[in-house]
Amino acid sequence: MVCLVWVGRLVFLSPFFLSLFCCNTHWAAELDVDPTVAVVRISLPYPPRMKEAFSLNGTTTRSEAAETKPMNEKLDYTNLPCPIPYEEIQREALMSLRPECFEGMRFDFTKGLNQKFSLSHSVLMGPMTVPSQSPETIKIPTAHYEFGANFINHPKLMLFGRVLTDGRLNARVKCNLTDNLTLKANAQLTNEPHMSHGMASFDYKGSDYRSQIQVGNGALLQASYIQSVTPHFSLGGEVFWAGQHRKSGIGYAARFNTDKMVATGQVASTGMVALSYVQKVSEKVSLASDLMYNHTSRDVTASVGYDFVLRQSRLRGKIDSNGCTAAFLEERLSMGLKFILSAEMDHKKKDYKFGFGLAAGE
């Protein structure tokens, strides 16, 4: 009897449940609700500001964070790096393209007396090139001994002196007068008349610029300035006056450098144009090239070079458009002992130079 009563109630209420189910299905279609699950998920649009900060699960997504991050960060021109000195604007290229080649046999020995003072001895035996009007190279055999003394109180004061058996005396001084002002001086005295010279310079290092003033014998005056324009780009210029020869000039330079490359360009009113490029293939390998053009003589020279820094040795070399090739090898045999090989061949002038040496000391 009870069962018949419940069956009657279900039959009576079935139209009501059917209409309610259809209504719920309509709401599910409107609100993106799955009617077969117990939890209702309503997809409502977030406000624009909340959508930038949060995702549907309450955390920031990578795509939305990338949208909020500015594409180009604003450059702070008040915090630019200090550029290198104007005179060293091509130092990376010169390291590969201008190796210190020599001819004959060389032996260098350096002995440190204490942490600041050291003595050096050097012996060189080999031919010396004599200037002549003929196209052929004239060489005479020579040999000399060089004694040197070094005082280094880094970074405040550095003194270097060299005396040779032929009567030449070379001296260099570098002194930091203040944290930003540096004095540099060098001199060479010889027995030959009008061959001695000296020069002094004051270098000022700013936060994002460098300036230099040079004074030398022969009424030589020179001033240079270089400024960082961006973190990787700098521009500079120089003026000079040679009173003894009654000549003056002005020059401009640009340098662009990153972690992988260095490109420089220089032009002067004397007609010289110099371009250089250095590519850092890795931490131990660098490739370099340069182009020199003299507008007055219409002379053009291009060269390419390399610099390999290995675990026990360093190899540098270059070849230019005049047919001149050079290589310079430094091999560390042990702690404090280094073997040196040098070679330079100029096929155009038929000038060939080969040398070897040892460098010992601390």
Image (cartoon, grey):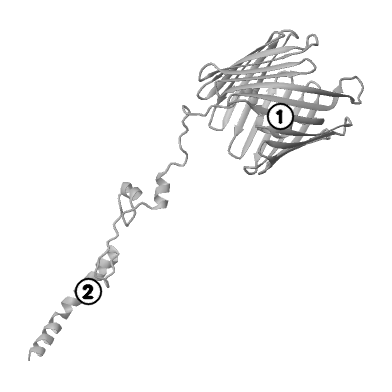
Q: Is residue 334 left or right of residue 20?
A: right
> Which residue is painted at 72% across and 33% down in the image?
359
Going by the numbered disc 2, the residue's amino acid type is: Phe
Q: Is residue 199 left or right of residue 142?
A: left
Q: Is residue 81 left or right of residue 63?
A: right
- In percent of width and height, residue 318 lies at 76, 36
- In percent of width and height, residue 317 lies at 75, 37
Is the residue marked by circle 2 packed among few (<14), some (14-19), or many (20+) residues within 10 Å?
Answer: few
Is the residue marked by circle 1 packed among few (<14), some (14-19), or many (20+) residues within 10 Å?
Answer: some
Quadrant into which the N terminus falls: bottom left
- In percent of width and height, residue 147 lies at 72, 21
Residue 192 against residue 319 in the figure, above or below: above
Number of the front mark, 2 or 1: 1
| Disc nearer the start of the sequence (2/1) | 2
Residue 80 against residue 330 in the figure, above or below: above
Circle 1 is placed at which residue position? 109
Going by the numbered disc 1, the residue's amino acid type is: Phe
Q: Nearer the viewer, residue 171 or 91?
A: 171
